[in-house]
Image: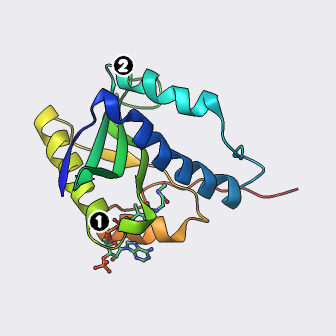
């Protein structure tokens, strides 16, 4: 298995994995996430590939794209409350269901850490939805720690 940056001719394969993530979120929080196939979402991958602040990485096994991540360089300038924040955000992350529990997501994280170090980032960040407990179990196993919480009260 090989982890590397995505090629332009792999974007449709990546969209197939993005649909899995979209379905998980629309099933988990239907009041927030749109369901069903949406061209606007699939077309976004072409914008992401062109964006100089974003990178798409893939895990490839025997010629098949079996995992992907979208990375986003975030810079928030200093303001009255905070110092400048400069970090690498993982916008999207998934492994094909037929290839899970084989260390592919762990290999993606190892690649992302190496890339972040090379680029001089000191932090990698991601956010996730509380219903997605299997993703939480993976992220914690990979070494991520919760440092901030969003709370809500339904009224
Ligand atoms: C979360 C996800 C990326 C993990 O991918 P993976 O390739 O199966 O993960 P790995 O094989 O590298 O797992 C490494 C370790 O993480 C933990 N882990 C991974 N998946 C887990 C799960 N479903 N439940 C509990 N622990 C899990 C385990 O400790 C595992 O080690 P082990 O297999 O030796 O027990 C994958 O399940 C996925 O794509 N889920 C759907 C998409 C998604 O939710 N993305 C995140 C959106 S925020």
The foreground one among 52 and 73 is: 52
Reply above or below: 73 against 109.
above
Where in the figure is residue 126, as x and y percent of width and height? 42, 48
Q: Residues within 10 Å of mark 2 (few under 14, many from 20)?
A: few
Where in the figure is residue 58, as x and y percent of width and height? 29, 45
Q: How many marks?
A: 2
Q: Is mark 1 within 8 Å of ligand 1?
A: yes
- What number is the disc on residue 142? 1
Examine the image and state in which quarter residue 71 appears. Answer: top left
> Residue visible at 42% across and 54% down?
94
Quarter in which the C terminus is drawn: bottom right
Residue 55 in sight in this render: no
- What number is the disc on residue 50? 2
Examine the image and state in which quarter residue 24 appears. Answer: bottom right
| Ligand 1 found in image quarter | bottom left
Where in the figure is residue 15, as x and y percent of width and height? 48, 40
Q: Residues within 10 Å of mark 1 (few under 14, many from 20)?
A: some
């Amino acid at each position: 298995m090989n982890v590397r940056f995505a090629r332009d001719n792999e974007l449709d394969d990546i969209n197939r994995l993005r649909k899995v993530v979209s379905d998980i979120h629309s099933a988990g929080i239907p009041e927030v996430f749109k369901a069903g196939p949406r061209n606007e979402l699939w077309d976004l991958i072409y914008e992401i590939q062109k964006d100089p602040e974003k990178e798409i990485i893939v895990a490839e096994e025997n010629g098949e794209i079996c995992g992907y991540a979208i990375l986003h360089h975030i810079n928030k300038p200093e303001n009255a409350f905070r110092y400048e924040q400069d970090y690498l955000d993982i916008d999207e992350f998934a492994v094909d269901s037929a290839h899970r529990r084989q260390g592919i997501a762990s290999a993606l994280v190892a690649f992302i850490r190496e890339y972040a170090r090379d680029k001089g980032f000191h932090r990698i960040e991601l956010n996730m939805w509380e219903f997605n407990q299997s993703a939480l179990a993976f992220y914690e196993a990979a070494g991520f720690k919760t440092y901030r919480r969003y709370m809500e009260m339904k009224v």
